[in-house]
Image: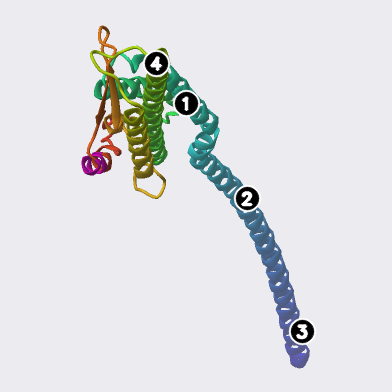
């Protein structure tokens, strides 16, 4: 009996131990399954959050890149406008020829520069208004830099336009002087053919030949000093070497010729006239 009782105790103990092991294994399986499920749900949630954050960052970068490229697009889109401004400057140079006979060279330069500067500034300010950013300081600085570069480019264009206008006016003056010389020569030839006397004396054929040679030599020196090999542009009004003075009541033609040495010095000094400094755009 005692041995049977001990055997039952051992059997019951082993049965309880097996049951405990089975319960422990079942708990471990449940815990592992729950942990796997939680880890999977956490991973899925993190991936979704990461995808949302990546999309948001991508959109923000696209917006920033687009905003940064806006000044460049504006710069390239303004090229036709700048060409149009140059065309307007050319038209202003044509109209300024009418003022050349009434105004001196200095006031004329200032007037042309002011007109061109005012016109360009008004049109540039009108185009600049819709593209002013208000929220991004960095973009504002970039746009200010672009605007300053555009101002400098426009200033250089205006300076070149003023130089072109001056040259055009000087060419007109020189052509007018040449036509005057031709007319005077024609009058002298007609007077010589008719045999009219000139204020108590006559110009002989040799004197006419000398006058013509001196005139041609003066013009030749003037154009040689204004050739491309020399560091000058075009001769100014003061570089005209021959001046004919014809009085209304006296038919005598007076020929005044400058000294060749003084002509070279004056052409070297005056063929590059100082430009009127234009005010900067702000």
In the rendered structure, the answer to whether residue 120 lies left or right of residue 55 reads left
Which residue lies most toward the bottom here? Answer: 3
Residue 105 position in % (x across, y down): 27, 24
| Rendering quarter of residue 173 | top left
Locate the C terminus by quadrant: top left
Q: Secondary structure at mark 4?
A: helix
Determine if residue 282 is in view: no
x, y percent for residue 274: 26, 36
Marks 1, 2: nearer the viewer: 1
For the residues carrying marks 2 and 3, which lies nearer the camera in this image? 2
Closer to us: 275 or 277? 275
Q: Is residue 204 left or right of residue 51?
A: left
Residue found at x 34% / y 47%: 231
Res. 187 mark: 4
Magenta residues (range) = 260-266
The CA span between labels 1 and 2 is: 51 Å
Mark in the foreground, 1 or 3? 1
Residue of label 3: 11
Secondary structure beneath dot 3 equals: helix
Tell me: residue 163, above or below residue 183. Answer: below
In this rendering, which labeled residue sits more in front, label 1 or label 4? Answer: 4
Q: Which mark is residue 232?
A: none
Marks 3 and 4 sit apart, C-alpha to C-alpha, by: 155 Å
**Depicted 99 relative to depicted 25: above or below:** above
């Amino acid at each position: 009996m005692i041995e049977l009782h001990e055997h039952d105790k051992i059997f019951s103990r082993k049965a309880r131990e097996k049951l405990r092991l089975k319960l422990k294994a079942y708990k471990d399986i449940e815990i592992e399954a729950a942990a796997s499920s939680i880890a999977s749900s956490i991973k899925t949630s993190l991936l979704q959050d990461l995808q949302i954050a990546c999309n948001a960052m991508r959109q923000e970068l696209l917006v920033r890149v687009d905003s940064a490229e806006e000044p460049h697009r504006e710069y390239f889109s303004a090229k036709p406008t700048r060409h149009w401004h140059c065309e307007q400057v050319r038209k202003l140079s044509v109209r300024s020829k009418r003022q050349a006979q009434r105004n001196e060279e200095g006031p004329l330069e200032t007037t042309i520069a002011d007109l061109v500067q005012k016109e360009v500034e008004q049109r540039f300010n009108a185009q600049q208004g819709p593209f002013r950013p208000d929220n991004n300081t960095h973009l504002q600085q970039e746009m200010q830099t672009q605007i300053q570069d555009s101002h400098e480019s426009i200033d250089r264009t205006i300076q070149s336009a003023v130089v072109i206008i001056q040259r055009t006016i000087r060419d007109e003056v020189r052509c007018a002087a040449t036509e005057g010389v031709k007319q005077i020569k024609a009058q002298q030839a007609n007077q010589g053919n008719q045999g009219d006397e000139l204020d108590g004396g006559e110009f002989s054929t040799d004197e006419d030949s000398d006058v013509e040679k001196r005139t041609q030599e003066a013009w030749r020196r003037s154009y040689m000093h204004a050739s491309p090999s020399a560091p000058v542009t075009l001769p100014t009004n003061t570089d005209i070497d021959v001046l004919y003075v014809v009085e209304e009541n006296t038919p005598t033609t007076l020929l005044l010729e400058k000294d060749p040495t003084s002509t070279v010095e004056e052409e070297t000094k005056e063929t590059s006239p100082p430009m009127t400094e234009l005010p900067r755009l702000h």
